[in-house]
Image (tube, rainbow, N blue to C red):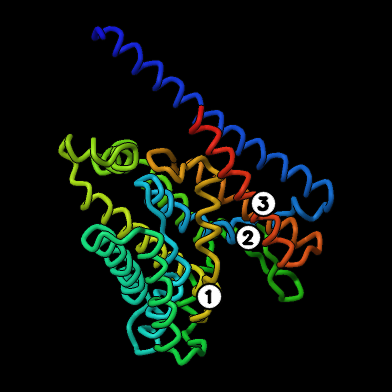
Amino acid sequence: MTEATQAGGGETAGALKFSADTFHRLTALMTLALLIVVFAFGNAAFLSVNNGLTVLLQTSVIGLLGIGMTMVIITGGIDLSVGSVLALSGVITGLSVKAGLPVIPAMMLGVVTGALCGAFNGFVITRMRITPFVATLGMMLIARGLALQLTGAAPVSGLGEPFGILGNGSLFRVVELRENGFPRVVFPGIPYPVILLVIVAAAAAYLLRRRQLGRHIYATGSNEEAARLAGVLVDRTKIMAYVMSGALAGLAGNVLMSRLVTAQPSEGVMYELDAIAAAVIGGASLMGGVGGISGTMIGAFIIGILRNGLNMAGVSAFIQQIVIGFVVIGAVWIDQLRNRN
């Protein structure tokens, strides 16, 4: 085979991959637009500013978890522990604040706790050669058990007003005082969790597309052996992916517990499935090597809007799980068709 033929084949494969990824992302975007139209037609309050802010707040936690999950899935792995790590990190933050530590250092400690859980996942997977499914399933049980043990299965309350600023505060909030002395919200502002999600998403997209670690993550998921022969430190790359997933789970835990102004050890149940769904709906392949942050953000908003719209329609939480389950199956089926083609 000539060099020209090889180059032509590579360019054709790249073009087909680009076309498939773009088509998948556009399909997800059209699905998101369709959901907005359907729910807006069914309930006029769906397009209200307050409901829009509710969707953004709900999606921020799913989005943070989904970003970390995307990095892991691109390497060809999976992280089933993010929901439990979210709870453990939030509990560590809450207990630290309760012990007298300032809020910001306490939240940093919560993020570090999540990163350590991710490092443990990476160590078990790369050094002990245990499959990601089993390793992270074990961490899911360990983290949840630790959160419940540390708190006695009781919420950690009385954390003070500063603890709730991250989850409930907003930028550019405008409030005016009425003649009767009561305040009126002119503009609710941009919630801090949404700003945080935008910053994290931009940083993660830059890392995946412009930095060496990002290229190594894609290479590891595309062909692990070829990546190793090319000089990629595959084990270190995998560990870094799981560390980032754990750290973002810790950050999501801070956001969620701050919104509640209480550290709940039982929070985060089934959140790992929402994170996986967001990544897969957005185009990440469970076979590894394919995925992106923009697609995951679209997937996160699809999950968030789907839950919000069904809630407003009076659909029970059990039916919502069924609907989202079918959505995940459909997304994986589309991914399999893409891989076959």
Q: Residue 248: x and y, percent?
A: 39, 60
The residue drawn where x is 37% and y is 71% is 139
Is label 3 in a helix, a strand or a loop? helix
Q: CA distance from mark 2 to mark 1?
A: 27 Å
The residue drawn where x is 84% and y is 50% is 42
Which residue lies under the disc numbered 2? 188
Of the image marks 2 and 3, the number of the one nearer the N terminus: 2
Q: Is residue 49 left or right of residue 70?
A: right
Q: Is residue 185 left or right of residue 147?
A: right
What's under tag 3, amino acid-wise? Phe
The residue drawn where x is 42% and y is 64% is 249
Does the rendering let one see residue 301? yes
Compared to residue 324, the image places residue 41 above or below, namely above
Extreme residue toward the bottom, this view: 152
Is label 2 in a helix, a strand or a loop? loop
Q: Residue 262: x and y, percent?
A: 51, 81
What's under tag 2, amino acid-wise? Pro
Q: Residue 111: x and y, percent?
A: 34, 68
For the residues carrying marks 1 and 3, which lies nearer the camera in this image? 3
The residue drawn where x is 48% and y is 68% is 83
Of the image marks 2 and 1, the number of the one nearer the N terminus: 2
Q: Quadrant of the N terminus?
A: top left
Which residue lies under the disc numbered 3? 326
> Closest to the observer: 319 or 67?
319
Q: Are marks 2 and 3 in contact (CB under 8 Å)?
A: no
For the residues carrying marks 2 and 1, which lies nearer the camera in this image? 1
What's under tag 1, amino acid-wise? Glu
Which residue lies under the disc numbered 1? 267
Q: CA distance from mark 1 to mark 3?
A: 24 Å
Q: Residue 178: x and y, percent?
A: 73, 69
> Closest to the observer: 271 or 201?
271
